[in-house]
Image (cartoon, grey):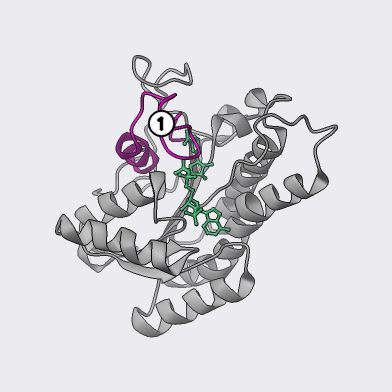
Amino acid sequence: MTSFPNQEKIALVTGGNRGIGFEVCRQLAKAGLHVIMGSRDREKGRSAAERLAKDGINVHSLPLDVTDPKSIQSVKSVIESDYGRLDVLVNNAGVYLDEAAGILHMDEQIFRDTLEANFYGPLRLCRAFVPKMIERGYGRVVNVSSGLGAMDGLSERSAAYGLSKLALNGLTRVVADESRRGDVKVNSACPGWVRTEMGGGFRSSKSGERGGNDCLACNPGQEGSDRRVLPRPKIHSLVIRISRPKTGDMGDALQTHRDYSFWRT
Ligand SMILES: NC(=O)c1ccc[n+]([C@@H]2O[C@H](COP(=O)([O-])OP(=O)(O)OC[C@H]3O[C@@H](n4cnc5c(N)ncnc54)[C@H](OP(=O)(O)O)[C@@H]3O)[C@@H](O)[C@H]2O)c1
């Protein structure tokens, strides 16, 4: 099995210029990984990377729009030529376009735009990078999902968003299944309700830092374990809710699974 220190790991985080993605970039870089921060707006990416640099944290920002196959291809080419491989993919970029509209009446375009970013984006990125992870025998993928996309979390509220995350969880399942060779692990994670632009500035008590941390805390599985996803009987969705009972706002108990471990393992 391939196993190497964080210092040699190359990570790509989509939507890394703000919110949870920004914190995921910060925390992975602090853990010693070489982080590529995907940002759909080049300038926003540059200024986010500069903000981290002021704290002594270096990341490499690249323009990346997950709805644009050419943009993904171009990032893939840069990663292959500059780094030779990708070890960690965090599919974090997402949109939440339908807070108020019910599915029966909403403009179909809202539904399509939501799926483009939240489902087809991660699908394209998995197709771009996971085959090589399988070939090399090492890889970690975290799809940043939501409790609203759990089977028992779906409701008329935010239906397009919820269904896009349900599809993302399904994607996690099938890519995990297809990646069984070698040490490749594919998981979904829910950060809980987090104070970001999407989460609504002050409505949630949970900071982006904690949201980012929680996305990473439940991730990619123990080195040496052949467990890639929760065992089948426990799956009604692959969302792992790890909001802490006292501070999380989603009302979920802490649910981690022993087969999940931390980046530093
Ligand atoms: N906040 C919460 O309470 C919460 C709860 C559960 C799950 N989540 C999930 O956590 C993830 C991050 O959410 P957040 O709260 O940090 O949201 P956010 O503050 O709105 O940030 C979203 C990020 O995604 C980027 N993005 C959107 N569309 C993109 C595209 N087509 N290509 C590339 N990047 C794109 C945005 O880029 P721009 O800056 O260019 O717009 C931004 O960097 C999402 O997947 C979300 O569904 C959040």
> Could you tell me residue 76's position as x and y percent?
49, 76
**Front position in the image: 254 or 37:** 37
> Could you tell me residue 108's position as x and y percent?
82, 46
Quadrant of the image containing the N terminus: bottom left
Q: Classify mark 1: residues with Cα within 10 Å, few (<14), some (14-19) or many (20+).
A: some
Ligand 1 is within 8 Å of the C-beta of the residue at disc 1? no
Could one spot residue 3 in this view of the protein?
Answer: no
Residue lying at the far left of the rendered structure: 56
The reply to whether the magenta stretch includes residue 181 is no
Side of 11 where 72 appears, left or right: right
- Relative to 121, residue 247 above or below: above
> Could you tell me residue 51's position as x and y percent?
25, 57
Q: Which residue is mark 1?
A: 257
> Could you tell me residue 261's position as x and y percent?
33, 41
Magenta span covers which residues? Answer: 190-217
Residue drawn at x 55%, y 65% is: 65
Side of 166 where 144 appears, left or right: left
Residue drawn at x 60%, y 76% is: 70
The image quadrant of residue 20 is top left
Residue drawn at x 35%, y 51% is: 22
Q: Amino acid at mark 1?
A: His
Identify the secondary structure beneath mark 1.
loop
